[in-house]
Image (cartoon, rainbow, N blue to C red):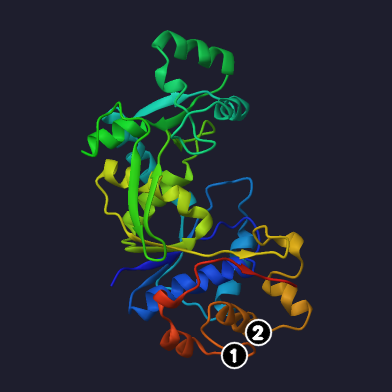
Amino acid sequence: MPTGRFAPSPSGPLHIGNLRTALLAWLFARSAGSGFLLRIEDLDPERSRVEHERRQLADLRAIEIDWDGEPVRQSERTHLYRDALQRLEDVGQVYPCWCTRAEIRAAAEAPHDPLPEGAYPGTCRRLTSAQRSERERIAGRPPSLRLDAAAAHAAAGKGSDDGWPPVLVFDDRLHGRVEDAVDDFVLWRWDDTPAYNLAVVVDDAAQGVGEVVRGDDLRDATPRQVLLQRSLGLPTPAYAHVPLVLGPDGARLAKRHGAVTLADRAAVGDAPGDVVAWIAASLGLVEAAQRPTPDELLARFDPAALPRTPTTFDD
């Protein structure tokens, strides 16, 4: 029975789409009799706020989501990420990169098939020592550190180190077999903060997470994380990427779409139970206007029957 988790970033209030994903992650875990953890992904010091974290925890409790133990904060676990980075450096799978966002965008406009759109083409991987010294002098700042994806793929016994780009495959409980090319992605940022992909892989393994349920917008990140798991000798959890909630304009739900948080809904007369009722109906667990209890949701939950397409929330 794999342990599940929900891992919000405390950069603002949770909206109905976030709460729907949280409820789904909880249902996947609790319906299987599994543990459920909460992790606060607060690596971005400029956007993360204690008040946002408190509000998020309160909102999760308001829709009757519970979790095991105290929440873990990534900002308190940097030493674990440094250790993992060092292991990758020790086997020659990391290189420095000084490319700016503008340079990466310009490079991405050139054809690099079969790289995914916007992927990093490996510019700094091909630099000599002298060229690296010159790039650092011109940049005037420390480099970011990238994973050499082809070298990592070869070291894991999945192909040669000149096979560019490596292609990773994983199984998704909702989407089946997913296959995608992986570019050289950032592990550590130039401002001395660990990148999301490294931190989440280290944390999932350290916390014993056996199943990751999260939004479809993170499906593209999963091949990168699978590659890191193999490189670090860590287990690969099961994955289920669930459909998003969209606004009436077809874009991912956001504050601009109106009353989309629990506080917003309370201001127009909706209780947390009304929000749960809408979420449950959008998942086909209840009829519209029914107000299910958590036990009723668990009894009715069937991952195989979940919708595979996004849901529109129209305030």
- Asked whether residue 11 is in view, the answer is yes
**Quarter of the view holding residue 31:** bottom left
Q: With respect to residue 238, does 34 lie above or below?
A: below
Please tell me which residue is depicted at 56% across the width and 28% down the height of the picture: 104
Q: With respect to residue 17, does 12 lie above or below?
A: above
For numbered disc 2, what is the local secondary structure? helix
Q: With respect to residue 73, does 24 lie above or below?
A: below
Residue 291: mark in rendering: 1
**Quarter of the view holding residue 237:** bottom left
Horizontal and vertical percent position of residue 160: 25, 30
For the residues marked 2 and 1, what is the alpha-carbon distance in whole angstroms? 7 Å
Q: Amino acid at mark 1?
A: Arg
Q: Look at the image and tell me in which quarter the C terminus lies.
A: bottom right
Q: Is residue 212 left or right of residue 60?
A: left
Q: Residues within 10 Å of mark 1 (few under 14, many from 20)?
A: some
Q: Is residue 306 left or right of residue 228?
A: right
In this figure, which residue is indicated by the disc labeled 2?
274
Please tell me which residue is depicted at 49% across the width and 31% down the height of the picture: 120
Q: Nearer the viewer, residue 39 or 300?
A: 300
Please tell me which residue is depicted at 45% across the width and 35% down the height of the picture: 115
Please tell me which residue is depicted at 36% across the width and 34% down the height of the picture: 149
Q: Look at the image and tell me in which quarter the N terminus lies.
A: bottom left
Q: Nearer the viewer, residue 243 or 59?
A: 243
